[in-house]
Image (cartoon, grey):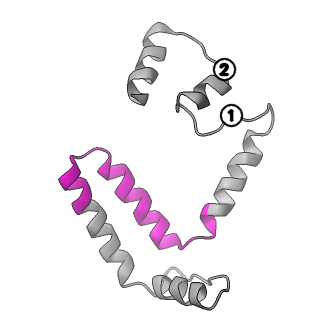
Amino acid sequence: KKAARAKELMFTADRIGSERAEEIGLVNYAVEGGTATDRALDIAARIAKNGPIAVRLAKKAASAGMQADISTGMDIERGCYAQVITTKDRLEGLAAFREKRAPNYTCE
């Protein structure tokens, strides 16, 4: 449905405001003028707190999986997760959670 709305806007050249774009799911957030960079940096900081290998592979799985049928998408996700399972970062994340502390990821 989002893709259809996006195409409609492209083909008709209709303009909508940021609030409407957020309302119909075309954008994640509508922000006040001049605050987009702050919002983007806030989101980036939240992402950066997570394991870099896991984030990279989640991005890969989501991007590739969205272009595939459900069965292939699940295979892609399983393959990416299998790569995370063997990392020291995964073990560090689990230990940090168990010990109620911030993780110290090393990209290993």
Which residue carries the number 1 mark?
30
Is 27 on the left or on the right of 43, as rendered? left
Which residue carries the number 2 mark?
17
Instruction: Kindly give the residue lying farthest to the left in the view shown.
Output: 71
Cα–Cα span, label 1 and label 2: 9 Å
Amino acid at pointer 2: Gly
Give the vertical position of 98 relative to 58 (above or below): below
**Numbered disc 1: secondary structure:** loop
Task: Report which quarter residue 1 is drawn in.
Answer: top left
In the image, the segment drawn in magenta is 47-75
**Numbered disc 2: secondary structure:** loop
Residue 70 included in the magenta stretch of the image: yes
Q: Residue 73, labelled with which disc? A: none
* CB atoms of marks 1 and 2 within 8 Å: yes
Question: Residue 19, percent across and down?
Answer: 67, 26
Question: Residue 64, percent across and down?
Answer: 31, 51
Q: Earlier in the sequence, mark 1 or mark 2?
A: 2
Amino acid at pointer 1: Ala
Question: Residue 2, percent across and down?
Answer: 43, 29
